[in-house]
Image (spheres, rainbow, N blue to C red):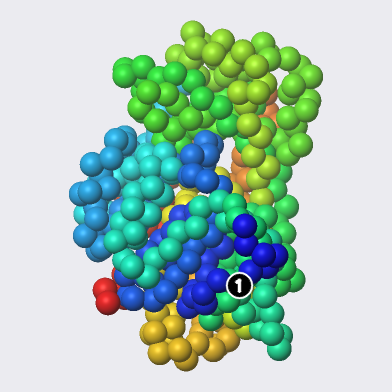
Amino acid sequence: MMPPNATIAKTTCCIIGGGPAGIMLGFLLARSGIEVAVLEKHNDFFRDFRGDTIHPSTLELMYELGLLDKLLAIRHSELRRASICVGDQIVTMADLSHLPTHAKFVALMPQWDFLNFLASEAYQFPSFKLRMGWEATGLMHHNGATTGVIANTPNGAVEIPATLTVGCDGRHPTSREAAHLPLIEEGVPIDVLWFRLSRSPDDPENGLGYVNYGHFLVLINRLDYFQIAFLIPKNGFEKMQQQGLESFQQSIAQVVPFLANRVAEIDSWDKVKLLTVQVNRLSQWSSPGLLCIGDAAHAMSPVGGIGINIALQDAVATANLLTEALQSNSLTPHHLQHVQQYRERAVHNTQRFQVFAHGVLNRVLNNPAPVKLPLSLRILTSIPGFKYLTARFIGMGLQPEHIKTRPA
């Protein structure tokens, strides 16, 4: 056992959180020869109901790193067109076949597979350390600056001195709370229920969901089963439970009829997980010695499935902007502020789109009648180039990043 708050060797960068942003940033920094320690409080990556969509912008990063073919050798499914079923009519909203990327599709892969893959590639670099089961509990400070991380480990509490601490610890982060960084909350009128139902090989493919009778469902193809998002009004889960499991099953079958013979698989509310949707952002992503990125800096809605990809873009931009300063031991608060200045506009505009989409979805959830495809949507999808532009937004985002750092 370590003594209370034992101090371990100093690292150049200590990353809190082993999610997509944390592992990617750790990989890129270690690839450039920078000492990095990634702290992940869980003992593995196996947590269900997480983002599974790896978009073309992320697949392009894998290509630039020489890892695309190796990644795609992992079992996955591919989505090349994004359609939505409104009532009994299906309309294609986005066609990814024209994207300027090597992989012109969304890869649907459990997040634990992607993280295990990325971590295994990072382990080839001697300066990469992944500490599983290490939970950050606070920050170290000296003269008003963050100087490292305090963590609980299987062997006791430790202090980890670091030149830079990066918070990648999700929507309830120790990093930003310990640093008292100011948070701006957006009102969100919806929550999401996650559950799974078995999938048949001949089931139709549909990337954007099914809308009818006051309900909205999104089916994510995990080959053997569907991971399903069922949108509900904010704080509406308790009311739904009171109406009973059978009513919930009937709602699913009503909106997605081909699932009717499978809804009995949900035989307990324990099989339904509630995701409380948040959209927020820090007005200040950094303080001396500390930077927050990904959900720690700006929680995204599940709308569009783009949160994981935004976080990865943050990580790439952070590595591009900070690697040289970390290598030369010349990092200043200005470098950290520059990350926010560079990424903030694209993130904020994406959140604005999500907030607009929430308003549309809220009207859907408050209209229990059968719906028909709106004329406005028919007109939009008939405009030349519309499906390309939507594919560009979904697949690439507003500010796709590229690998600019070099291996050591």
Residue 179 placement, left or right of 302: right
Crowding around mark 1 (Cα neighbors within 10 Å: few <14, some 14 to 19, many 20+) is some
Mark 1 falls on what kind of element? strand
Residue 136 placement, left or right of 265: right
User: Is residue 23 in sight in this rendering?
Assistant: yes
Residue 129 placement, left or right of 361: left
User: At 31% from the left edge and 36% from the top edge, which residue is drawn?
Assistant: 76
Q: Amino acid at mark 1?
A: Thr
Counting from the top left corner in percent of width and height, residue 227 is at 48, 30
User: Depth check: 26 or 286 in front?
Assistant: 26
User: At 38% from the left edge and 42% from the top edge, which residue is drawn?
Assistant: 113
User: At 62% from the left edge and 42% from the top edge, which residue is drawn?
Assistant: 360
User: At 31% from the left edge and 19% from the top edge, which residue is drawn?
Assistant: 201
Residue at numbered disc 1: 7
Q: 335 above or below 90?
A: below
Counting from the top left corner in percent of width and height, residue 139 is at 67, 71
**Quadrant of image for the C terminus:** bottom left
Counting from the top left corner in percent of width and height, residue 332 is at 54, 89
Q: 325 above or below 122?
A: below
